[in-house]
Image (cartoon, rainbow, N blue to C red):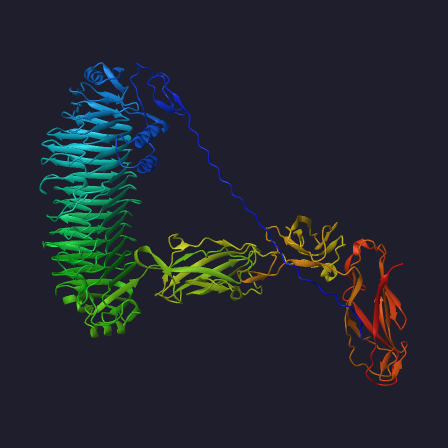
Amino acid sequence: MILIKNLHYNKLKLFLIYLSIFLIGLITNTTIVKADSSDTEVPQSLNLNSNLSDNSNDIAVSQPYKSDFLNQINGSGEFDLKNKQINATLKSLRAQSTSSVPVLNTEGSSVTVNSWQDFIDAAGDTSVGKIVIGVDLKAANNKVSFQNDKVVAFNGHSIDMASRYMNTNNYQINFVDASINSTGSAMLRSSSNAVIIFSGIGSLTGTILDTNNIYTNLNFTNANYVTQNTSSTPTIRFQGSSGGDLSIKDSTITDSSRSFYYSSTSDSISKNINIDNSTIKSTYPSGTSNYFISTYGTYAQTGMILKITNNSNVNVDKTNQGDFNAPIYLFGTNTKIILSTNSKFTVNNPNGAAITESGVGSIFDVSDEGTELNVSRSGTADYNNAVIRFAWTGEMTFDIKNHAKVSINQNGTVNTYGIRMYGGGNNISVSNGAEFDCINNSTSWGPGIGDNDGQGIYYAGGGSSNSFKLSGTDSQVLISANNGPAISSLSRIDMTAGDGTSFVARGYYPGNAIFYSTNILNFNMGVPRYFDFMNTASIGTGTGGTLFNCSDTSQFSHGNIPLSVWLSTSNVQKSPTKSWKYVNATYSGVNFNKFTTTSSDADFKEFLVNNSGLSKLGRMTANTAPAQVKNAPDQPTNADSYVWVPTLMPAENNAYRPSYDNEVYAEVQLTYPDGTTKTATGTSVQNQKYYEYSTSTIDGAIKIPISSLGSSKKYLEPGTKIKILKLWRNDPDYNSINAIKTDMSNTKYNQYKEQTVIDKTPPDPVVIKNNVKMISQWSKKLEGTGEPGTSLSWKIVHHNGSADTVYPNATTVDSNGNWKINNISGIVNDDKIIVYLTDKDANTTPFSETIFHDATFLPATVVSVGGTNTLSLDVTENLDFGIIPAYTPVIKSPASKEFNVAVNDDRDPSHVNGWKLMARASNFKSGQREISSDDLGLELNGNNNIINITNTDSLIREQQSTDDYRGSTILDLINGPQKIKLRSNGVDYPGKYTSTVTWTATDSL
């Protein structure tokens, strides 16, 4: 038996206090100086011509800030020339302009005018090239008539035209920073071939220009202008036998006019609007007859050309209610709307059509990467107005191409259309990577195929034939009708969907079809990237709805595709009725009830025979597009037991969804730091736990355990590179003819960037020398082992709740893994010391057990501070040497047992003496028999000196120094584990023998 004394430790609470302070400061400053030439306020950064003087013929105009101007004006309230806030904003914006561009150099002198008469005189003086407005002016009885080319600089002032006007005659007049208010007639008139230019920053209230039988060129160049007009007379109007052009270039127009532009010129007259690198916002808050651009006349007259190009952004939101009416309303032969070169055109009519175009040969052309057309209508008006209406004539083209995007949304409650095209010879074309969405969300009354029947696209009015063409890789179409067919036609319709395209068509038409022609429907579909035709009326009850309604001479064909179909009596939102790997067919007859095929799939043929071709289908879809791969949410680490490869399946309109179980396959290569490589193959799994201990899931990822790569390690090795070699779908065998392979060189599909495994595993907790768990409050040092090269920090967690005392980067673990902390102070009983390590990658041993990815990180080592101001001992309680032979004079393999003995020195510093450890062992006894220690005894081997433990005290160890050894000291008597040996010189009588060892620690004298 062994006598011991046990220590009891009190647990302390750990308090962590964090303080984060985030300060944000913002200082702005603007410095204004005066220019002697005209007293115009400009910033110091403005580069003025050094020769500018009162006699200079040049005027500098600032390039406006478009977005700043719009934002500041929009926040200034209703448009009103007398609104002091707007005027102050305009004045401030002029002062902030930082670059100057000469707009017009004129011959003649510069004159400052301070009265209306001065203005009249200067306008008529041909020796004057520049007029500077010196004060706010109000028109008197006489009109201003310009007699030569001039610049009129408003210099922060305004003109109130009352019912007067300025006549530019046939000259070129440049108004700079103009602020003009006209309450009667138009503020400007002109003679033939006049050129009117507005530049700088200004505001125009009322009708700007009203011409009759006079050709005039009106320009906004390098301009930021607010325009408003509550009059029924348009802001800009061209009438009569002569046309005119409107040019808006490098400018911003913020318009609040009932009618911005109107043209009612005669046939064969030029009518052009060019919007180039400009931003326009046109709104009007009330009324039902408001528009941005409108032409009047018959659709047989020469039409207008509207161009929106070069990064322009036009936003129109106005109500124009009535049959054919729209905020954009263009009539005439060969009318052209051209939207291109990264420009945006957004039109909304709160209660009617957004765009109406009419005229034989008319074209709506949307082209180029970054170009977007967004058109919508809403409200309850029940006119025939679609979101976009091609009216009256037929032979019109809607052409979307070259990666442009079109979005059409019918959001009204009435059962109108997304697009309505009247007559024959009409064509909608989507090509060369363009995207076309036509969404009809109408809900009122039942669906149909005629007027106001909720179609996505409606070819109305009969005619010979119309067409819908989709071509070019990655071109895509989405037509969705909430309460009607996707497409209906009252005449023959020819449709194509070329190789590599995406065509999604959805409609709701119970008992009928979503592709509905009262005549012939010819549909030639090659091998699309994706298509999905669905009648949402098929919900698994009743007869549902079908896909095609057409005459007997119609034809539909598709190339070799992996096809899935649903019968109209099934629920088209659930699993398909049938699926085939690869099939092709040509269908004919009424509603495509006949077929021919070169496919060898007998099941496919049998299904078509039993179900009358396609005539009973409620949905059909195919997907030939390659799968997509991307990087996992987290970079791989050396705490990962798996390689994650998120994969996605292509869906409608270039969208992607997470892969389902066993839908996508990948081959992954790992290149280890030593240059060796391993590969493994995996398949997608849906809704699986992301990492071993995570509560979140990841959809559609391939999860490859590193054990499948032949690794004996539990986690990925830092520095390992991960690369996806192959990705495919549709067949587990990459070499199968059915496998749809991803081109890994195409970044559209391969978005996985080669990954390098990073080190996120913190160092293991340190080991305190002699496995010390508690030290005295008088202890001065602590030492132990840890990961070589790491930085060691430690902190005191005070039991009274005070802030932790932290000693960051106190020392570095040496190359042998040893460390030592000296000069410990400031600890008292019930405190705790936490020792933690930080490696070169800034990974730090956590203070509590932490789960990260697939690993569990052990907490930092905690040493308690405590004791009773005494010496105490911890020793192993029992030793059992088992069975040994009796009568054996020498045990050739001496029996030995590991044991622990620790001296706990918790005495205060007044105890200057060290301590000594003594041990004695009673003679072994079996019952009443007692064996002499000479025959059966115990011994220690300390420093190669044998210490016999007999029935008298034997000195085991003496410690003279006290301060260095405060706390617990486990005796290190021999190299390796401590052992006590049983020594025998022979025992006469067998039996169970026991002995008691008594350990005593006392002051060293």
Q: 129 or 682: nearer the eye?
A: 129
- The x, y position of residue 619, in whole percent, is 25, 66
- The x, y position of residue 125, in whole percent, is 20, 15
The answer to whether one can see residue 193 in this image is yes
Q: 748 or 560: nearer the eye?
A: 748
Which residue reaches farthest front? Answer: 800
In the rendered structure, the answer to whether residue 496 lies left or right of residue 959 reads left
Q: Quadrant of residue 502?
A: bottom left
Above or below, 372 relative to 759: above
In the rendered structure, the answer to whether residue 841 lies left or right of residue 392 reads right
In the rendered structure, the answer to whether residue 635 lies left or right of residue 871 reads left
Q: Quadrant of residue 10?
A: bottom right
* Residue at horizontal 22 percent and vertical 33 percent from the top: 247
- The x, y position of residue 321, in whole percent, is 16, 46
Q: 706 or 332: nearer the eye?
A: 332
Above or below, 508 relative to 151: below
Total residue callouts: 0
Quarter of the picture containing the C terminus is bottom right
* Residue at horizontal 30 percent and vertical 58 percent from the top: 652
Above or below, 243 relative to 852: above
The answer to whether one can see residue 789 in this image is no
- The x, y position of residue 207, in whole percent, is 18, 31
